[in-house]
Image: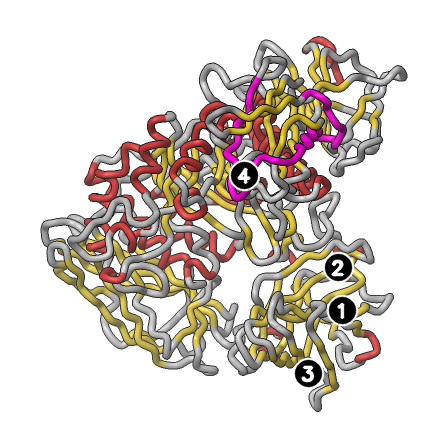
Amino acid sequence: MACADMAAAATLKPASIELFCITPNQPAVLAFHVEAGGLNARVDVVVRDYAGRVVPTANVNVSDDGLLRLSLQLEPGFYEIEFPAAEQQFGVICQPAFEGDRDPFFAIDSAMSWLVHDDATREGLVKVLARSGVPMSRERLNWGEVNPDVDRWDWESSRRYETLRQVCQREDIEVLEMFHGTTRWAGAVGKYPEDLVGTARAWRQIARRLGPTWGAMEVWNEPDISFGDNLPADQYVALVKTFAYAFQQEKVATPLVGGVFAHFNRQYLDNAARNGLLDQVPIVSFHTYGRAPGMEELIGRYRQWLVDYGRPSMPLWLTECGRPWKRGPQRPPADQDAESALDIVMKGVESKACGIDRYFPFVYPYYEERESNFGMMGREATPLRSMASYVQLVTALSHKRYLGDLKCEDAKIQRARVFGNGKEVLVVLCTGSPDTDATIRFDLPVQAIAGIDGRQLAAREDGSIPIPDGLVYVRLERKQLGERLQTDTQAMQLLAYSEQVKGEPQTASPVVLRYQFDADLVEARSEAYRLLAETPGKMSFAFRAYNLSSEPQKRTLVLSFSQPVVLEAEAAQSVTIPASGFADVRWDVDLSGAFAATGMLCATVRTQGADAAEGESVEIDLKGNPSLDQVLGRYPVQRRLPIGDLSAWANNITGSGKMTMRVSEDGGWRLNCQFRGGDRWVYPHLRLAGDVAVERYSAIVLRAKCAREAAVRLFLWEGDTGVGYISPVVIPADGKWHTAVVPFEDLTVSGANRPDPNHRLDRDQVRRISIGMNSESDENTLDVSDVFFVAEN
């Protein structure tokens, strides 16, 4: 609609971000500052709904104060406002303001401390959260910026940390604080602070200052990957114990959140649990960028881990969970925007059904990372479809409990989750992909139908329901469900765990033990410490006992092992740990033969004495370097793959890369690859012979070496479906030969490939494997001499 004059060179900027959330069927005005141009040409304003249909309801005028004002009155839903002459678009959420108590399940990862630099934009974004019924915002705090020296504090820094948190507090938005960076004066063990005494003292002061704005505090971010320097979990848990004691002494009511896991790596999780993580915190968090259909299985794995360690009802928070679009434009194309919206919303639906306590989509503001943009707002800070759809999810499911699944006959329906609150019943139906013409058969009387953004939809004359967005909300009367409501679902079992009585963390001790690993003796990886010596022999073990209290602490430290070893001194050593200090203890141990049985060894140090308390222990996992023959000796059932037949291999490398393979003298192969920067991956495919029945085996054994730094992994592919399951890193990339055992149960579905409809590795469908790497350098070489499928019986 041509409504006013504006120069083609003009740039529009929203006057107030929060005004782009309007009330349905009521007059609203959007105001824009006019920058970098004048108002001297005809202005076309085009308003489109979620589906891209033009809505002719706009009126523009320019006031004396120089603001361009757009008057609207719209039905519920999402809208995009386009000014073709300015080549700009802006998003609008048309939903009633949230009223009543907000549902704590709904949160968001905002990261405005780092991603949004303008105070006015920050304040507008916070007000949008308050209006939308989102009670918690995840933030970031760089410790080194607020506390650059031991006694120097800068609560604002260039990022205006304190001001942002005060804005959140004023709008009644709790902050989930998170930090994953040390400060220079605290030293470093990998990326963690070395000075745990100073860390405890500093964070007591930070909590005194910023704590009133917090709703919870996450200790670190994704410690299981590079953010934790890929160190084993025992190093991370020492930091968690430090925080637990500091907050306990400061009487901080803010709950600590531990874990913050990037991946479900059972070896890392088990070591964290054995080191007392689940005793120190009341909440565990994790992240996923997988697709919605795999959520139930993933949540089930985390819940089973908690069950295995006696914490079945411990709250699980999903504090990062997103679906990016391709970087570049100010706002994504409609199809990419709709795909992001569907996955983010459906993961929220699945999380609520499966008993997740809080859900944080990633990420609220515009944010580009590598080739992706994770933002739920455009560069101009107005809503995308993903944000509008999340607000509708908040509106639709707040304070509704999962009741079960609705039995549906239409095969297009992937999920039919039923929620209710005693007043109404809502069915969330999902097909998994947007399709403007899609309908589904639905043979129950409906009260109302809403699209993913809350716009009202109508049933067709034949009774079918439109589902153009891949997801639809259907309101029913409870009595209509009858026997169609299925309550014996996997999700219901997971929800039941989350609703059990919660335990309390144990009293934190001032004594924290940490393994002082020697990088000349072991390589620290997230799964374990790997011995560098090819043949294990004598080795020193050093441990540091920190005393976070103001009084000296006397303890006896006792070292034990999971396999027979020879200690050259007494296993028990007594120390007096000075107030606000530490004491070091060392043992010399002969490890000859300790790795023969399993290739793994666990070393444990516990305290004894009159004042010894629970939690004063540390467990470290050590991995040896067994030969191929030693590993194969554990598995009676074996099948060697003919990897030297290069005709069975197919190239598979990133578009900018080149790869060559040649047969090596040992009957294996050498892979040389070259890249031109960017995403450096190479995973050639091996087609398995027809008589290879993968379901007969439980693991893969391979012997390989990688010349330069890389993440060496393998894939199993289910037929030609594009569904791939990826391993953790299998060998160190140090130019030396290593033998690895990769249990099939350690493989997880690859989020970079097609989602798996049944969310499990079907070994009987595996017809291809890939062995390769994500290289850190533009040139690399991978040698593989042997690959076996194996089983214990």
Residue type, mark 1 in image = His
Answer with mark 4 or mark 1, whichever residue precedes in sequence: 4
Estimate the x, y position of residue 756 in percent, counting from the top left: 73, 47
Residue type, mark 4 in image = Pro
Q: Are marks 3 and 4 in contact (CB under 8 Å)?
A: no
Highlighted magenta segment, given as a residue range: 28-57
Residue type, mark 2 in image = Trp
The picture quadrant where one finds residue 101 is top left
Answer with mark 3 or mark 4, whichever residue precedes in sequence: 4
Q: Are marks 2 and 1 in contact (CB under 8 Å)?
A: yes
Q: Farthest bottom residue? A: 665
Residue position for label 1: 685
Residue position for label 2: 717
In the rendered image, the vertical position of residue 425 relative to residue 266, given as above or below: above
- Mark 1 closeness class: few <14, some 14–19, many ≥20 residues within 10 Å: many
Q: Nearer the viewer, mark 4 or mark 2?
A: 4
Answer with mark 3 or mark 1, whichever residue precedes in sequence: 3
Horizontally, residue 545 falls left or right of residue 733, namely: left
Q: Farthest front residue? A: 40
SS at badge 2: strand
Residue position for label 3: 670
Answer with mark 4 or mark 2, whichever residue precedes in sequence: 4
Residue position for label 4: 361
Answer with mark 3 or mark 2, whichever residue precedes in sequence: 3
The picture quadrant where one finds residue 477 is top right
